[in-house]
Amino acid sequence: MPRDIPKIEVSVNGKPAHAAFYERLKSARMRDAKGTESDEVELVFDDANNEIEEPEEGSVIEVAIGYEEDGMVKRGTYLVDKPASPSGGPGGEFLRVHGRAADMSGDLKEMASEHFEDTTLGDVMQTIGTRHGLAVKVSPSLASIPVPYLARFNQSTLGFGSDLAKRYGGIFTVKDKTLLFVEEGTGSAGGLVLPRLEIDKSDCETWEFNPESRPRHETVKAPWFDRTTGRMRYEEEPTGMERGPAKVLRHPCPDQAMARRMAKSEGDRLAKATATGRITLAGMPEAAAECEVVLSGFRPSINGLWIAAAVEDVVEGKYMTSIELEAPKGGRK
């Protein structure tokens, strides 16, 4: 089905926007990011005669985007995070409204200290999520990881979750009132398979790639102290790259299992950092952060599987989508 007539739907504090809202709307930008990088919305209005009613800080904005021909996709729920910004000049007067993801605000940023003993990573996430009134989804491979002891000291839930994500090779985020702790670079979120996008070069208006954005390491070594021998030992994991020196992590792990997990997590991160890119094409509402993107029609080194690191939709006369790309788990081969 052809997609010819883009459409955006906005509600403010639960009330659908009226016709005058859309008549004055000059541009809309929505950014969907992974992890704790906050999703954003920015709306710019024609403010001729200063007739636009400024939304108060804390107002809730919900946005859906799509096409009249095949329906709408909810892009996000946002809180207005600062006063609206007026501007003007020879081209007219404008009012800019900015919001950040509603799920990334409030008590998730409050500092706290606690510890966990003889549990699993899944139970840790469940405890945290329940405390904040959130549903919880954890990848099975991460949920079953044993946690003998884990301390949190004067740290926000967002900071604590982000640190655990780096340690265990996952992504921690909160979307649609759900705490997600999922495997990174797998094209899924919370057990839900995201769309697999197939995009040809002919679909793109612009593109840019950096095939090797950081130095390569063939392996990663993580130290741990073996109490039975009194010696420091190392767990080594391949990154999937075919050349480069080993990267040795600085801080010792408490045991062999954690060292193996840390080495694998860092190896996956390094492999993903070996390539980045960005493509811009006609609006694609089904695109989302962490979905798989299969490219074709480019150079052989570019074609194939990527992961969407972030997605930005812009409606300004026409509807366009930009997708920031990174290498999948295991890196670009």
Image (spheres, rainbow, N blue to C red):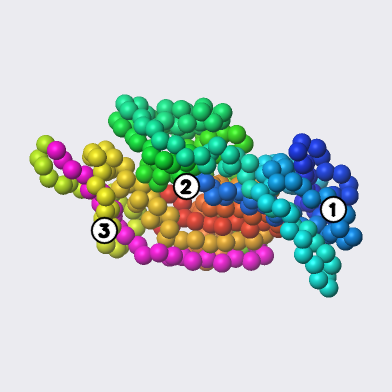
In the picture of the structure, the residue carrying the numbered disc 2 is 185
First-in-chain label (1 vs 2)? 1
Mark 2–mark 3 Cα distance, whole angstroms, equals 22 Å
Labelled pair 1, 2 in contact (Cβ < 8 Å): no
Res. 72 image quadrant = top right
Mark 1–mark 2 Cα distance, whole angstroms, equals 42 Å
In the picture of the structure, the residue carrying the numbered disc 3 is 246
In the picture of the structure, the residue carrying the numbered disc 1 is 52
> In percent of the image, x 43 and y 55: which residue is there?
272
Percent coordinates x, y for residue 316 in the rendering: 77, 60
Mark 3–mark 1 Cα distance, whole angstroms, equals 58 Å
> In percent of the image, x 56 and y 28: which residue is there?
133
Locate residue 121 relative to residue 48 in the image: left or right.
left
Q: What stretch is highlighted in magenta?
A: 204-227
Labelled pair 2, 3 in contact (Cβ < 8 Å): no
Residue type (three-letter) at the residue carrying disc 2: Gly
Residue type (three-letter) at the residue carrying disc 3: Ala
Percent coordinates x, y for residue 112 in the rendering: 44, 36
